[in-house]
Image (cartoon, rainbow, N blue to C red):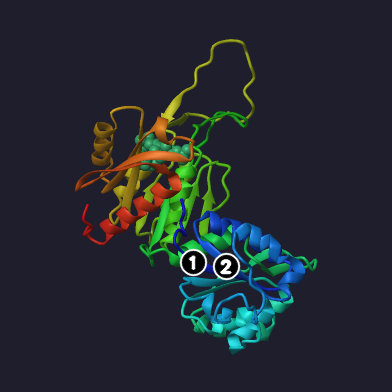
Amino acid sequence: MEELKGRNLVLGVSGGIAAYKAAELTRLLVKAGAQVDVVMTEAATRFVTPVTFQALSGRTVWTDLWDARIGNNMAHIDLTRGADGILIAPASADILAKLAHGFADDLLTTLCLARECALMVAPAMNRQMWEHPATRRNLAQLQADGVAIFGPGEGDQACGETGLGRMLEPEEVLEAVVAYFAPKLLVGRKVVITAGPTFEPIDPVRGITNTSSGKMGYALARACVRASAEVVLVSGPVSLPVPPGVRRVAVQSALQMRDAVLAEVPGAAVFIAVAAVADYRPAQTAEHKIKKSGEPMQLWLTPNPDILAEVAALPQPPFCVGFAAESRELDAYAAAKRAAKRVPLLVGNLVQDGLGGDDNEVVLYDDRGRHPLGRATKTELAWRIVEHLADLLAGGTQQE
Ligand code: PMT
């Protein structure tokens, strides 16, 4: 999905060891569909050469306020004409100080002063520089001036210290930029999402599970963050990283998932049940590994609680979105499931389309009828589900 298709961005790279991350960020921004004009400070060119950014952006890289290649010799104004935003990553303590005080002593700072577009910064510096009162003051000023600040993250630093000040990873910065431009469809709303399979233990080493990868649920979590929601992802065992901006609660079994969901649902505006929850669990879990006897063995199963139905039946339920995974007769089974679980919106998919892969084909069912979304990546479908959900929350005014 080209989330930044049609966007023109100026990527400012200031001097710092994290400048190497800006190379990967350039690649990701271009892959997401943006046109990227890279502007480097003199210090940045000490860490990475302009050639790297030229190759990755496919465009001229600018470093000099006096560059004569621009027709009117006004690089400091022309580069942001028509731009949607300037993103400075990494943003050093020095450039933050200059921006806070309106300095314009090189191409990048001059562009930032002579602009009408958005300004976003991803700070990167040593922990002590980040914590210094001067940096704190500069940050507060930039925030008051409407500058978007992404990060920084916490962790090991190039100087050997540990703490706040690391530039966010390129994927996280990309996600923040996409969210910055995305419509704030769910702003102020808490969304609880379940994702992945559950694992129902038979003994300490074995259990019953399924092949849900978690990709659909994680894509929805990312889409909800993009729409500015507060997102809690109650996730069964999957091998996916926590999406930026999401609070993940990791669980194993359906009973643990139920407890986590019921603890998170108070205060939530929306509950989206994407998880492939095991309908049954072993009636008893053996304390020790079951030994092979060579004889046939019976496993007694007992039904798991239906988390979605339970949430939908709360006295003041959040807006509930269910999923239905079927292997045939999607319309009939999905409609029956929506009625049985009493949910206003149900997303139907065939297991052969949706389980495991990066793509899916889904149909939405609500009081207005059936809305096929066709085949697309899970990322793209997730955003379209969020758009549909936001429209229903707003009273369902959107024309089909
Ligand atoms: O994870 P992926 O590989 O990306 O695959 C995505 C998916 C196919 C798992 C997903 O798109 C999907 O269809 N999820 C629902 C799977 C499922 O369990 O469907 P169901 O028809 O059995 O359940 C109906 C609904 O009730 C679901 O919202 C389910 O989360 C919920 N449920 C079911 C049983 C239970 N005990 N508690 C529940 O909350």
Q: Which residue is mark 2?
A: 37
Measuring from the top left, give residue 233's x and y in whole percent.
48, 52
Ligand 1's quadrant is: top left
Residue pictured at 80% horizontal, 66% vertical? 160
Q: Number of callouts in the render?
A: 2
Mark 1, secondary structure of its residue: strand
Q: Residue furthest toward the right?
A: 160
Contact, mark 1 vs mark 2 (Cβ under 8 Å): yes
Indicate left or right for 322 with 71 as reference: left
Residue pictured at 54% horizontal, 54% vertical? 31
Q: Amino acid at mark 2?
A: Asp
Indicate left or right for 50 with 139 as reference: right
Q: Amino acid at mark 1?
A: Asn
Q: Which residue is mark 1?
A: 8
Measuring from the top left, give residue 365's x and y in whole percent.
26, 43
Residue pictured at 66% horizontal, 65% vertical? 154
Measuring from the top left, give residue 346's x and y in whole percent.
30, 44
Question: For residue 365, which numbered disc appears in the image?
Answer: none
Label 2 Cα neighbours within 10 Å, binned few <14 / some 14-19 / many ≥20: many
Label 1 Cα neighbours within 10 Å, binned few <14 / some 14-19 / many ≥20: many
